[in-house]
Image (tube, helix red, strand yellow):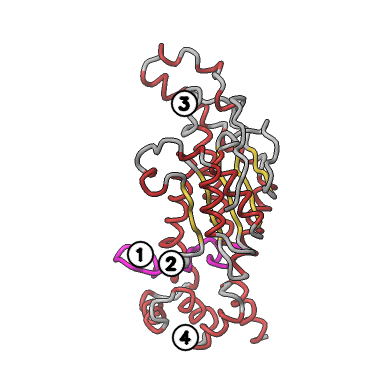
């Protein structure tokens, strides 16, 4: 059995300190409370902007892993874990990714999604064992922790690193040193929370922003968009069928009838229908061209244009 040291947690993260700007929040009327919260929230995008180069490194590692047939893992506890589960779940309907591409590991498991599970986040050994069993060499693992020291997360990252995965940690504590087993440290300085220690606020907003940017950039780099359009989605209801036709029309300028026919010939595959209309090829040729370009629509379209020149 793999043994990992339990990290010592020191309460010196900025998120645990009292915010001098919100000392009198309990004296304010409702609009004043909301205005103060909003003022603090506006600090988050700027803080995230400071760590974009590190986030880009994490995206590149994720893209490399997925291109080579591996997976991306999220690991978190509490709010961090719930946000990770949400992001992984949303990628399946949004970008039609295989269900195993993004795997979320949450301290305490499914029970902890709706209620607190005592001591789950302090279980470094549990995190290590879960990730050691799930991660394969070549995978990429992204951990999330407001304090920068959550034992479950750090134990999981260390085990994943030892197992041959690349790793990154999103932390809300710029004072914490890079833990063992972490290749890329993304330390976001959102400062003290409106309510001291309530890391579901600015720290959580920063994590949500980073997760959305991370997964979206990964999808863009993998060619699951064309321009700024979602072209890997599958139409599973009336709303999505309407969106699919609008995307085809906006990307190609073809009529509604032409878009509907192309989509039918492509058996509902939006990428294939898009290639069919942009390149004037049949569905089988479009499928082959996409496969030859790793499913990257822009590259396949460029290859089509090069062949026609």
**Circle number at residue 37:** 3
The residue at the point 56 percent across, 39 percent down is 151
Q: Residues within 10 Å of mark 3 (few under 14, many from 20)?
A: some
Q: Quadrant of residue 306?
A: bottom right
| SS for callout 2 | loop
Classify 198 as above or below 145: above
| SS for callout 1 | helix
186 left or right of 229?
A: right
The mark that comes first in sequence, 1 or 3, is: 3
Q: CA distance from mark 1 to mark 3?
A: 35 Å
Please check the rendered image and state whether residue 106 is part of the magenta-colored stretch, yes or no.
no
Q: CA distance from mark 1 to mark 2?
A: 8 Å
Q: Which residue is mark 1?
A: 240
Classify 71 as above or below 284: above
Classify 117 as above or below 26: below
Where does the magenta region start and end? 221-245
The residue at the point 53 percent across, 52 percent down is 129
Provide residue 38's location: percent of width, then percent of height: 47, 28
């Amino acid at each position: 059995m793999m043994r990992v040291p339990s990290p010592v947690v020191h309460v010196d993260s900025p998120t645990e300190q009292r915010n001098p700007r919100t000392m009198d929040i309990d004296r304010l009327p409702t609009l004043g409370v909301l205005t103060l919260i909003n003022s603090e929230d506006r600090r988050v995008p700027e803080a995230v902007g400071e760590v974009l180069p590190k986030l880009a490194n994490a995206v590149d590692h994720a893209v490399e892993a997925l291109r080579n047939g591996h997976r991306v893992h999220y690991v978190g506890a509490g709010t961090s874990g719930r946000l990770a589960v949400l992001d992984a779940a949303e990628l399946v309907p949004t970008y039609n990714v295989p269900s195993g591409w993004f795997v979320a590991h949450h301290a305490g498991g499914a029970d902890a999604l709706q209620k607190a599970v005592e001591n789950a986040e302090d279980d470094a050994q549990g995190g290590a064992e879960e990730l050691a069993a799930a991660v394969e060499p070549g995978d990429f693992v992204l951990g999330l922790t407001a304090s920068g020291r959550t034992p479950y997360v750090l134990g999981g990252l260390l085990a994943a690193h030892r197992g041959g995965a690349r790793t990154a940690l999103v932390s809300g504590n710029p004072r914490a040193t890079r833990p063992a087993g972490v290749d890329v440290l993304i330390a976001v300085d959102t400062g003290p929370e409106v309510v001291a220690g309530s890391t579901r606020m600015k720290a959580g907003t920063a994590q949500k922003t980073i997760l959305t940017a991370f997964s979206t950039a990964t999808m863009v780099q993998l060619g699951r968009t064309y321009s700024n359009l979602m072209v890997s989605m599958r139409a599973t209801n009336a709303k999505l069928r309407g969106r699919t036709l609008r995307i085809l029309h906006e990307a190609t300028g073809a009529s509604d009838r032409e878009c509907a026919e192309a989509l039918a010939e492509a058996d509902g595959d939006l990428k294939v229908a898009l290639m069919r209309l942009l390149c004037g090829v049949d569905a089988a040729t479009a499928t082959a061209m996409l496969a030859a370009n790793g499913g990257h629509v822009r590259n396949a379209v460029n290859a089509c244009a090069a062949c026609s020149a």
